[in-house]
Image: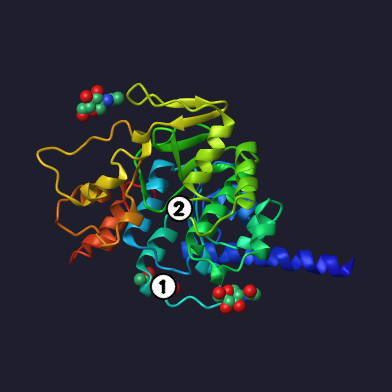
Amino acid sequence: MLRELQLSLLVMLLLSCGFLFQLTRKSSCLFSCLPPDKSQQGLEALLGKGRSIVFLETSERMEPSPLVSCAVESAARVYPEQPVVFFMKGLSSPTPLPPNSTYPAFSLLSAIDNVFLVPLDMKSLFEDTPLSSWYTQVNASAESHWLHVSSDGARLAVIWKFGGVYLDTDIISIRPVPAGNFLAAQASRYSSNGAFGFGARHAFLWRCMENFVEHYDSGVWGRQGPDLMTRMLRVWCRLADFRRELGDLRCVDVSFLHPRRFYPIPFPEWRRYYEVWAPEEPSFNGSYALHLWNYMNREGKGVVRGSNTLAERLYRQHCPRTYRHLVRGPEPGVTGESGPGNK
Ligand SMILES: *[C@@H]1O[C@H](CO)[C@@H](O)[C@H](O)[C@H]1NC(C)=O
Ligand SMILES: *[C@@H]1O[C@H](CO)[C@@H](O)[C@H](O)[C@H]1NC(C)=O
Ligand SMILES: *[C@@H]1O[C@H](CO)[C@@H](O)[C@H](O)[C@H]1NC(C)=O
C-alpha cells in the first residue's frame, strides 16, 4: 500500500517536473503571469480536451530545423485557442540540455503561448493500445526505418488516446481544418498519414493500430504509414475518385479530404516550393495547409533570405518569427518581438 503510494507520488512528481520544465522555459515569471490554462498539470490536462494539434520528433534532435519551426509556429497561429503539443524524443533522454542560446528554434517555439514542448515517452504512449506488444518486442536498432516507423505508430496512439489533429513537421498551416474526423488524400483513393484528425478513442485508429501489428513489415517503406491508412479506409468504406473540384468525400463518419487541401503541389513537383513564381503565385485558397514534402528534399533545399521563392513568401506570411529569427537574422537596432501574433 505504502509502496503504491510512493510509486504514484513519484509518477506525479515526474509529470510535474516535465511540466515545470516547460513553464520555466516559457516565461521568466513562473506561475503568476501565465494564462490560467498553462498552470494545469500534465499531459492529460494538455491533451485531454481532444483539441490539440500534435507534432512529433522521433529522433533525439533537440533543435528544430527552420521548416519544423515554421510548421509548429504556423499551427500555433492558425489555432490560437488550442494547445499545439510538440512531442520530442530528445526531451525524454537524461542528458542535460545545453544552454538555450545554442537552440534558437527551441527557444523561439517554447516562447509561444500555446506551444508545449513535451517529452516523447513511447513506452507509456503505447500502453493500453495494440502497439504495446509490438513495441516491447521490436529491436529498434535492427530496424531500417525506425524513425519513420516509430513515428507512424506514435501518431496513431496519441490521437487515439486523446483525440486531436496530427500534423507532420513539414506542413505549414494556413487556415483551420473545419472537419471533425478526417484523413487527407494524397491522390485519388490514396490517403496520407501526414495529417489526420479524430475524436478520442475512435475505432478507425484502433483498427489501424491492430492492422499495424498484424501486417508489420518494417522493410517496406510506408507500409505502416500511408499504405496502412489507405487499406483501412478501403475497409471502412468504398472509395470513389474525387470528382468535383475540391469536393471532399465522406466515408461513414470520416471526411476524406481532397488532395488540394494539404497537397496542392503534388510530390513530383515539390521543388516548386523553392522556386520563384512569376508573374503570380498560387493563392492556395482551397487549402488548409501545405505539405512541403521534406522527405523528397535530399538536396537540403531551404529558405534563403531575399530569394523571393514561394517558400520564403510562405514563411514571411505564416511563420514570421521563424522567418525573422532563423532565416532573416537579427537586424541591427531592431529589438523586441512583441506585436500582433500569438504572443
Ligand atoms: C538564455 O537564458 C538566460 C537565463 O536563463 C537569459 O538571460 C538569456 O537571455 C537566454 N538566451 C537566449 C538566447 O534566449
Ligand atoms: C538488435 O539488433 C542489433 C543490430 O542488428 C543486434 O546487434 C542486437 O544484438 C539486437 N538485440 C537483440 C536484443 O536482439
Ligand atoms: C480561388 O482563387 C481563384 C483565383 O486565384 C479563384 O478563381 C477561385 O474562385 C477562388 N476559389 C475560392 C473558393 O475562393
**Mark 1 beta carbon near ligand 1 (under 8 Å):** yes
Element at label 2: loop
Query: Residue 22 in the image: x percent, y percent?
Result: 53, 63
Give coordinates of residue 213: x percent, y percent.
Answer: 63, 52
* Residue type at the position of mark 2: Asp
Q: Residue at x 61, y 61 (%)?
A: 122
- Which residue is disc 2 drawn over? 113
Q: Residues within 10 Å of mark 2 (few under 14, many from 20)?
A: some
Identify the residue at horizontal 21%, vertical 36% (top origin).
282
Position of 109 with respect to 48 (left or right) is left
Horizontal and vertical percent position of residue 74: 36, 48
Residue 161 seen in this snapshot: no
- Which colour style is shown? rainbow
Furthest residue toward top: 244
The residue that label 1 is drawn on is 100
Outermost residue to the right: 1
Q: Quadrant of residue 139?
A: bottom right
Question: Which is nearer the eye, 258 or 176?
Answer: 258
Structural distance between the alpha carbons of marks 2 and 1: 18 Å
- The answer to whether one can see residue 206 in this image is yes
Q: Amino acid at mark 1?
A: Asn
Query: Which quadrant would the N terminus be assigned to in this image?
Result: bottom right
Query: In the structure shown, which secondary structural element does the residue marked by tag 1 occupy?
Result: helix
Q: Is residue 311 above or below residue 63?
A: above
Compared to residue 235, the image places residue 40 above or below, namely below
Viewer-nearest residue: 191 or 6: 191
Q: Mark 2 or mark 1, which has the lower sequence index?
A: 1
